[in-house]
Image: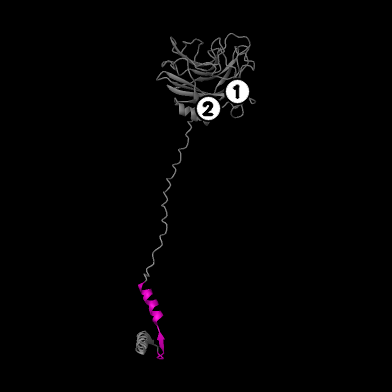
């Protein structure tokens, strides 16, 4: 039994001897635990696993907005603003002359019912009794083959017991017949107050005419009218407040009506008949025939 004890002691001494280190002072230091720690550290993977940083989603570049093209508003060749005169305010001077017929009222400047500027012009009477009235004559005017007129009209309904309900707004005819050479634009029919627009052209022998639907014009309010002529194609179009009006017939006009005679506002013939009753403001003439979108642009930016 003693032999086993001695062997165990020898074994322990041998084990301790194998794990002893000496420092400079020759003091024994037991390094068993340190050795185990070093061995553990050496077997541990010291390479750190990189942290996955979330990848930012690339921002899609914003497509630059293309600036919209500026709105181009056509410039009139003539523009009569009727601010106490009948002269065109453009560089192309053209002056009208008010002409009184019979005992009817003359054209007068008005500063109470105005659409643009300081004044408008007033035809007839506030009761619409217009058979004896006046017109504004602008003299011989070469209109060309494609042209457009625009104006503001404040129409007074015809009254006073007259048979004729026809009101001339614009014409270059000399006589009062439909076949007379030139063009005429009227409100209402000859004896019917149906609030339509009538468009007539003639060459001295035959005429061409179209009528709008009824109830397209309004009384006692400012309305914007555009009249577009294409003498080459034999077509014309009427617009109210920027929109084309419907017609009971095709928009056909003569291609050979005169385009160089006197331009007249508010009355037909010489002396004038079928007078207009109401106010007119800011009339413009353009030496081209406009499309629907161009008329809308003019109206929107009037």
Dot 2 or dot 1, earlier in sequence: 2
- Of residues 218 and 263, the one nearer the viewer is 218
Q: Quadrant of residue 154?
A: top right
- Of residues 96 and 189, the one nearer the viewer is 189
Mark nearer the viewer, 2 or 1 = 1
The residue wearing badge 1 is 221
Labels 2 & 1 near each other (Cβ < 8 A): no
Query: In terms of secondary structure, what is the magenta stretch mainly?
Result: helix
Which residue occupies the extreme bottom position in the image? 25
Compared with residue 221, is residue 269 higher up or lower down, i.e. above or below?
Answer: above
The residue wearing badge 2 is 79
Residue at figure coordinates x 47%, y 22% from the top left: 228
- Of residues 124 and 241, the one nearer the viewer is 241
Q: Quadrant of residue 105?
A: top right
Disc 2 on helix, strand or loop?
strand
Q: Quadrant of the N terminus?
A: bottom left
Residue at figure coordinates x 38%, y 77% from the top left: 38
Specify whether residue 76 is in view: no
The colour style of the image is one colour
- Residue range corresponding to the magenta coloring: 24-43
Compared with residue 213, is residue 85 higher up or lower down, i.e. above or below?
Answer: below
Q: How many marks?
A: 2
Q: Is residue 61 rendered magenta in the image? A: no
Specify whether residue 28 is in view: yes
């Amino acid at each position: 039994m003693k032999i086993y004890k001695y062997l165990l002691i020898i074994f322990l001494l041998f084990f301790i001897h194998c794990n002893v280190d000496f420092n400079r002072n020759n003091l024994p230091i037991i390094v068993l635990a340190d050795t185990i720690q070093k061995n553990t550290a050496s077997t541990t993977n010291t390479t750190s696993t990189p942290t996955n940083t979330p990848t930012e989603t690339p921002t899609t570049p914003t497509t630059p907005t293309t600036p919209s093209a500026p709105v181009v508003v056509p410039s009139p060749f003539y523009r009569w603003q009727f601010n106490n005169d009948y002269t065109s305010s453009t560089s192309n001077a053209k002056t009208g002359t008010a002409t009184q017929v019979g005992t009817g009222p003359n054209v007068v400047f008005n500063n109470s019912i105005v659409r643009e500027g300081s004044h408008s012009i007033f035809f007839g009477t506030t009761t619409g009794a217009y058979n004896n009235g006046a017109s504004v004559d602008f003299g011989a005017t070469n209109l060309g083959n494609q042209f457009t007129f625009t104006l503001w009209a404040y129409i007074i309904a015809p009254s006073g017991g007259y048979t004729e309900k026809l009101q001339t707004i614009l014409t270059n005819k000399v006589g009062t017949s439909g076949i007379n050479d030139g063009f005429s634009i009227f409100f209402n029919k000859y004896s019917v107050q149906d609030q339509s627009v009538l468009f007539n052209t003639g060459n001295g022998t035959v005429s061409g005419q179209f009528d709008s639907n009824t109830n397209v014009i309004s009384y006692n309010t400012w309305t914007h009218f555009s009249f577009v002529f294409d003498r080459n194609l034999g077509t014309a179009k009427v617009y109210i407040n920027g929109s084309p009006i419907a017609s009971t017939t095709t928009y056909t006009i003569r291609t050979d009506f005169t385009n160089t005679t006197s331009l007249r506002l508010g009355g037909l013939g010489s002396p004038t008949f079928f007078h207009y009753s109401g106010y007119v403001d800011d009339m413009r003439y353009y030496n081209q025939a406009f499309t629907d979108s161009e008329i809308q642009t003019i109206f929107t930016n009037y």
